[in-house]
Amino acid sequence: MEKPDFEKRIPVPEKDEYRRSKYYWLADLEVGDSFTCSHQDYKRIGRRFNTPVSWLPENFKIATRKIDNGLYRIWRIS
């Protein structure tokens, strides 16, 4: 790699401004809300967001159920 041009006085962006999760919309779910998704999305969401994540509301929990061939429903339960 060649030496890059250095830049001065470029502020470091706040962490939340720099990169937000592609699942940011989960924070908008209210208790009792649900949505359907594919098996692939279920694996990503169901496993990832049943553990604490800093940008989700405190005590955020979901429940998941297979409702059809390859289709899942995810509910916010707390």
Image (cartoon, rainbow, N blue to C red):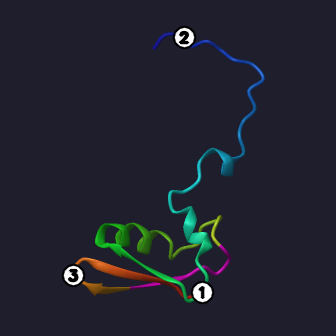
Mark 3 / mark 1, whichever is N-terminal = 1
Q: Residues within 10 Å of mark 1 (few under 14, many from 20)?
A: few
The residue to which callout 3 is attached is 69
Under tag 2, what secondary structure? loop
* Residue drawn at the location 29% of the way across and 78% of the way down: 71
Q: Which numbered circle lies on residue 3?
A: 2
Q: Which amino acid, by three-letter code, is at mark 3? A: Asn
Mark 2 / mark 1, whichever is N-terminal = 2
Q: Which amino acid, by three-letter code, is at mark 2? A: Lys
In the visual, does 46 lie left or right of 16?
left
Q: CA gap, disc 3 to disc 2?
A: 54 Å
Q: Which numbered circle lies on residue 31?
A: 1
* Placement of the C terminus among the 4 image quadrants: bottom right
62 vs 35, nearest the viewer:
35
- The residues colored magenta run 57-64
* Number of marks in picture: 3
Instruction: Tell me the chief SS of the magenta region.
Output: loop
